[in-house]
Amino acid sequence: MGSTVNISFDEDFLARIDRQAEQESRNRSELIREAARMYLERRERWSRLFELGSQLASSQKVAESDVLYEIQAIRKRKRGKNA
């Protein structure tokens, strides 16, 4: 097994955790481990995505202002279609 960690939660939040764990036929620790694992995986994916975006922007000589301009242009076109 791993290390034991003490975490404090307010009572209402802990009750929500316990209800969800019961619905999934898990114990509290399993639910919290899975939540932490999912959080870390998502953060790592976003980090990789931003790094890839930075690399592509650098190699294509795309500035932040170029991206903002394109976003505004797309939003403007969408508003025109919905009018």
Image (spheres, helix red, strand yellow):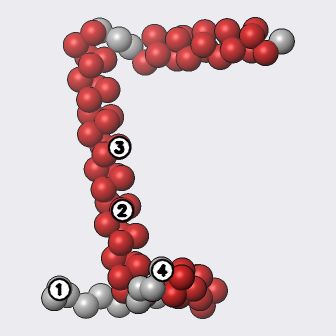
User: How far separated are the C-alphas under marks 4 and 3?
Assistant: 27 Å
Q: Of label 2 and label 1, which has the lower sequence position?
A: 1
Q: Look at the numbered disc 1 and give the secondary structure of its residue.
A: loop
Disc 3 designates what residue? 46
Q: Of label 2 and label 3, which has the lower sequence position?
A: 2
User: How far separated are the C-alphas under marks 1 and 3?
Assistant: 27 Å
User: How far separated are the C-alphas under marks 2 and 3?
Assistant: 12 Å
Q: Of label 1 and label 4, which has the lower sequence position?
A: 1
Q: Nearer the viewer, mark 1 or mark 4?
A: 4
> Tag 4: residue type?
Glu
Q: Look at the numbered disc 3 and give the secondary structure of its residue.
A: helix
Residue 5 is situated, as x and y percent measured from the top left of the image, at 30, 88
Q: Which mark is residue 24?
A: 4
Decide if residue 51 is in sight here.
yes
Residue drawn at point x = 30 percent, y = 56 percent: 41
Disc 2 designates what residue? 38
User: How far separated are the C-alphas under marks 2 and 1?
Assistant: 18 Å
Residue drawn at point x = 45 percent, y = 85 percent: 25
Q: Of label 4 and label 2, which has the lower sequence position?
A: 4
Disc 1 designates what residue? 2
Tags 2 and 3 in contact by the CB under 8 Å rule?
no
